[in-house]
Amino acid sequence: MSRPLNRSTGKRLPPPAARHSASLARSDRQRTAPGKRARGGQANLELPFSPPEDWHEPRTPRPKRKDPYAFKIVVQPAGKGYQHVLTPAEIRSRLRQLPPQFVELIEVVQLSRMTRKKERFPCYGMQWGNTLYLYPIEENRIEVHGRPPKPNQITEAAMFGGQWVQHARNEWKLQWSEPALKDFYLNNILIHELGHLVDQRNNGYVDRERYAEWFALHYGYKQSLRLEPKLRQRAVQRQHG
């Protein structure tokens, strides 16, 4: 089972009931930290860490909701210099397009705050228990990285309209437009983290990440093209822009 990633040391949190993934990110305040915007991290699950997060313990047994889409949404202040990408209405609207047996597993979706500690290794999103966490991004929608992106990171960003640009020898920036960033969060980050919650079969970190990536591609990116035909043309344009 995947566990929360320590965004300051790269170590993982060991609570036995936890099942989640952490999406690592880079910030302009910590350019020398290992890794770039990529899900995952170390596979050592026994290293201690106390994360700066508000954890919502899963209710046991989990009550059956009359409306499977009636999960709770918690909105925290984004933090100075940051913005939440999605609104509660956008989150509910997107998840209502998914089968109820997936969404009924969610108890809470939290739009988390950015703090000084989190700035060191900010996340796009995370899943723990029956809660999905979505994290804010810089207000200017520009992420600064100290290492070049990997090919899969370039491809993923291009799928949703993000653009990598090298500005100096050791400085790369990932730039987003507002529509592209919403597309990325709605049809990738949100669905990826839900994929971890839905995955009841895999225990290994690599297998869980592989499943969540497939889930996000099938129920996120590809479904968005079916739901909104105009996105087909936009997808071609943004991948070859």
Image (tube, rainbow, N blue to C red):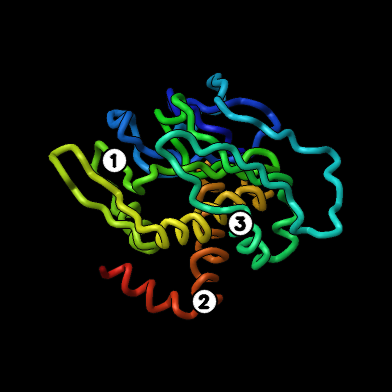
Instruction: Determine whether label 1 and label 3 are within 8 Å by CB.
Output: no
State the image quarter where residue 29 is shown. top left
Ranked by sequence position, the earlier of labels 2 and 1 is 1
What number is the disc on residue 46? none
State left or right for residue 112 relative to residue 65.
left
Q: CA distance from mark 1 to mark 3?
A: 27 Å
Residue 207 in the image: x percent, y percent? 54, 48
* Disc 2 residue crowd, few under 14, some 14–19, many 20+, Cα 10 Å: few
- Which residue is under mark 3? 91
Residue 224 in the image: x percent, y percent? 52, 70
Q: Residue at x 32, y 68 (%)?
A: 238
Instruction: Determine whether label 2 and label 1 are within 8 Å by CB.
Output: no
| Quarter placement of the N terminus | top right
Q: CA distance from mark 2 to mark 1?
A: 31 Å
Q: Secondary structure at mark 3?
A: helix
Front residue of 104 and 176: 176
- Can residue 56 be seen at all in this image of the molecule? yes
Q: CA distance from mark 2 to mark 3?
A: 16 Å
| Mark 2 residue type | Glu
- Can residue 203 be seen at all in this image of the molecule? no
* Disc 3 residue crowd, few under 14, some 14–19, many 20+, Cα 10 Å: some
What number is the disc on residue 228? 2
| Mark 1 residue type | Val
Q: Is residue 205 above or below residue 233?
A: above
Ranked by sequence position, the earlier of labels 2 and 3 is 3
State left or right for residue 169 relative to residue 196.
left
Q: Secondary structure at mark 1?
A: strand
- Which residue is under mark 1? 144
Q: Residue at x 29, y 40 (%)?
A: 144
Q: Secondary structure at mark 2?
A: loop
| Quarter placement of the C terminus | bottom left
